[in-house]
Each structure stands twice: as C-alpha cells, then as structure tokens.
Image (cartoon, rainbow, N blue to C red):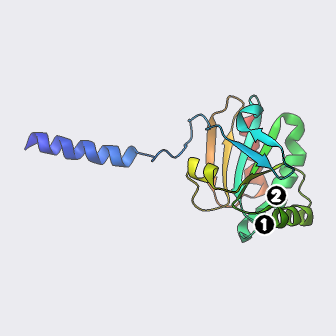
Amino acid sequence: MLCLIGLVGYAIYQVSTDTGGKPVEGDKAPNFTLTTLDGKQRSLSELKGKAIMLNFWGTWCPPCKTEMPVIQQAYIMNKNRGFEVVSVNIHENELPVSNFVRQLGLTFPIWMDKDREVVKQYKIGPIPSSFFINRDGEIVKRVEGPLQLSQLQQLIDQITS
C-alpha cells in the first residue's frame, strides 16, 4: 500500500511539473530557421548576443493589430541597445502580411511560419504570445496576450541590461 501511495504521488508530481516540452523561463530558446517576408532565410541563432523579443501573431488577430504599433515604437526606441524583434507571422501568405505591415508602418523584420512548425515547437496557444530572450539565449519571460508600452519597456530593460 505504501508503495502504491508513493507511485501515485510521483505520478502527480510528474504531471504537475511537466511543461509538455513547452519552452519556459530559464530554458535556452530553441533555434529555428524561417524565411522572412522579404525572402531571406534567417535563424534565431544568428542573433546570438542580442536581446530578443520573439512575438507570434496573425493579421486576423485584433489584439495583435493593437499590439503591433506598440512593438514598433519599442523597436525604434531600443534597437540601438542591441534589441531585436523576431516577429513570427502564423500560417499566412505574403500578400495580406505585406499589406498589414505597410498599413501599420512596421519596420522590424517579419518571419513567416507558413507551416506552423515554430508555433508547434514553442507550443503557442493564444496569440499574441511573446518570449523575451536575453543575450545568452535564455528565455527570461513568456507573455501570452497583448503588451502595453510600459510593460514592454520593462521587459526590454530586463533583457538588454
């Protein structure tokens, strides 16, 4: 009986601590390679030594549309501090994304995850979802939902220092 209780306790512990392979704070950010909106192949590993906001979004997502101008403003304010935005569009073609980017005046690079491979790799649920990755490639924070500028700036300060 004691052995059974121990096994049940261990099983409960495993379930409660299992992240299901979902990258979490303290993990190294998994590498991936995607094609950018302008047709270049880019890998996350190329940005080693930079502070990165990895943001997953879609043009059809109202909170994403609200958040994008905030990300643009933060990008302009912080790009000279070694801050990069990796903006991953989910499962769309170039035309609607290009129109969206032009309409909002976005200048940071857009990476295209047409097959949702990176979405699966990072176990993305609700969007927008963002990861803040420090210069050592470690995930410092995962945020699900849109960010306000003050919150975004605090997270950028945390990964650029």
Q: Secondary structure at mark 1?
A: helix
Q: Amino acid at mark 2?
A: Val
Residue at 88% of width from left, 56% of height from top?
106
Asked if labels 1 and 2 touch by Cβ distance under 8 angstroms, the answer is yes
Does 25 sit above or below residue 46? below
Q: Position of residue 63 (x, y in %)?
A: 72, 67
Quadrant the C terminus occupies? top right
Up/down of 5 relative to 95, above or below: above
Q: Nearer the viewer, residue 45 or 151?
A: 45
Front residue of 57/115: it is: 115
Closest to the observer: 111 or 83? 111
Q: Residues within 10 Å of mark 2 (few under 14, many from 20)?
A: some
Decide if residue 157 is in sight here. Answer: no
Task: Estimate the spatial distance between the alpha carbons at disc 2 and disc 1, rounded to whole Å.
Answer: 8 Å
Numbered tag placed on residue 66 in the rendering: 1
Q: Position of residue 64 (x, y in %)?
A: 74, 64
Q: Position of residue 121 (x, y in %)?
A: 57, 47
Q: As drawn, is 106 to the left or to the right of 91?
A: right
Up the image or down, 97 lies above or below 110; here it is below
Q: Residue 126 vs residue 81: left or right?
A: left
The residue that label 2 is drawn on is 70
